[in-house]
Structure formats: structure tokens, C-alpha cells
Image (cartoon, rainbow, N blue to C red):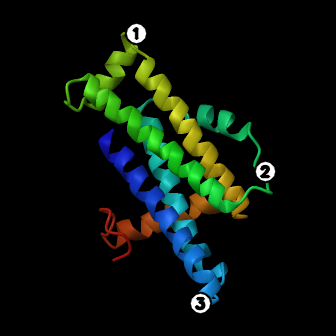
């Protein structure tokens, strides 16, 4: 579970960085929002990918997460920066829950199989809390996608195409489009 959690955090940081750079430079450099649209599309797709990976490892159906995340409609009057903060907070909760789980196990990182075994044996607390956190992340990213006027299918399709291209060029190992 450590890799998808760390990757989720890293990709969220990249979304926030792209947005922060645009906010900082737009007024002074007259940078147009359309200049960063492609970068945001890339990074938001990566957040979705890593969230899906985490949910899959936790054995939480994506349909379940989607159902609860979509029940809260985006308020178009809310600023994009608010949704960036919402995303950051939600991903922070994922990391905090994981840190507490490791601490509970005396600092030893359990395997996915051990986490799943605990859940099957009745200790569903970690899985339940992490499922709730995944819903919060998906809700935040869904709000961001809507507010940025992206289409969710566009984001996901673009990410799949990008990853297929990286696989083809043997740059899939987290090195980006090098």
C-alpha cells in the first residue's frame, strides 16, 4: 500500500504545483489558463490512476467510491483553489491513516495480504477509514475536474494513452516523459 499512497501524494503535489505556478505567474506574465490545461490534465489523470490502484488493493469497488463521491455536486461558485485545498486535505488523511496503521503495528509495514487478512478476520476499521478517505479524494478530484471544465472520460482516456506511450518507450517507471 505504501507505493500507491506515496504516488497519490506525489501526484497531488504536482497538481497543486502546476496550479500554484499558474496563480503566481498569471498576473505578472500574462500566462493564459489554456497554457496549463494540458499539464493539469496529465497530473489529475495520475491522481485518478493512483487512487484507483489504492482502492483496488483495499478491495473497495470503484463503483462504491464513485457512488458516494458523485452524491455531492460541485458548487460552481467555489474557487478552484478551494478544491485544490480539498484535494490536499483528503490526500493528507490517506497518509495519516496509513501512518497510524503502521504505528499500531510497531512501525512494521504490513503487506497488502496482511491488511486484507485483518479485514477478513473482523478488524475492518482500517479498511473502512481508508475507504472513507478514498471517497473524499475522489470527491475532491471530481469537483476539481468539474470546476476546471474537464470531462472525466477525457482525463482518464488521456492518462491511459499517456501511460501506454510511456510503456511503449520504456519510460513507465515513474520517470515521466523523459
* Quarter-of-image position of residue 111: top left
Mark in front: 1 vs 2: 2
User: For the residue labelled by badge 1, is the local secondary structure a helix, a strand or a loop?
Assistant: loop
The dot on residue 29 is: 3
- Which residue carries the number 2 mark? 75
Q: Nearer the viewer, residue 56 or 1?
A: 1
* Quarter-of-image position of residue 137: top right
> From mark 1 to mark 2, how far is it between C-alphas?
39 Å
Quadrant of image for the N terminus: top left
Is the C-beta separation of discs 3 and 2 under 8 Å?
Answer: no
Near mark 3 (Cα within 10 A), the count class, few <14, some 14-19 or many ≥20, is: few
The dot on residue 122 is: 1
Q: Is residue 27 left or right of residue 169?
A: right
Q: Position of residue 107 (x, y in %)?
A: 20, 30
Q: Position of residue 36 (x, y in %)?
A: 58, 77
Name the residue at 75% across, 55% down.
Answer: 78
> From mark 3 to mark 1, how far is it between C-alphas?
57 Å
Is the C-beta separation of discs 1 and 2 under 8 Å?
Answer: no
Q: Nearer the viewer, residue 1 or 101?
A: 101
Whether 142 is drawn above or below 101: the answer is: below
Mark in front: 3 vs 2: 3
* Quarter-of-image position of residue 144: bottom right
Q: Nearer the viewer, residue 28 or 65?
A: 28
Name the residue at 49% across, 23% down.
Answer: 128
Q: Position of residue 95 (x, y in %)?
A: 39, 41
Label 3 vs 2, first from the N-terminus? 3
Q: Is residue 95 left or right of residue 20?
A: left
Q: Is residue 28 left or right of residue 58?
A: right
Mark in front: 3 vs 1: 3
Q: Position of residue 57 (x, y in %)?
A: 40, 35
Amino acid at each position: 500500500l505504501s507505493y500507491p499512497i506515496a504516488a497519490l501524494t506525489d501526484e497531488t503535489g504536482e497538481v497543486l504545483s502546476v496550479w500554484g505556478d499558474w496563480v503566481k505567474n498569471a498576473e505578472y506574465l500574462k500566462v493564459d489558463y489554456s497554457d496549463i490545461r494540458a499539464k493539469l490534465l496529465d497530473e489529475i489523470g495520475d491522481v485518478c490512476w493512483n487512487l484507483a490502484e489504492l482502492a483496488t488493493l483495499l478491495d473497495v469497488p470503484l463503483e462504491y467510491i464513485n457512488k458516494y463521491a458523485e452524491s455531492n455536486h460541485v458548487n460552481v461558485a467555489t474557487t478552484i483553489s478551494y478544491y485544490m485545498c480539498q484535494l490536499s486535505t483528503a490526500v493528507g488523511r490517506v497518509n495519516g491513516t496509513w501512518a497510524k496503521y503502521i504505528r499500531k503495528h510497531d512501525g512494521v509495514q504490513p503487506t497488502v495480504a496482511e491488511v486484507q487478512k485483518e479485514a477478513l478476520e473482523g478488524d475492518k476499521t482500517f479498511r473502512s477509514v481508508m475507504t472513507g478517505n478514498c471517497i473524499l479524494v475522489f470527491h475532491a478530484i471530481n469537483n476539481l475536474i468539474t470546476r476546471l471544465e474537464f470531462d472525466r472520460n477525457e482525463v482518464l482516456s488521456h492518462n491511459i494513452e499517456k501511460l501506454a506511450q510511456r510503456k511503449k518507450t520504456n519510460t513507465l517507471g515513474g520517470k515521466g516523459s523523459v
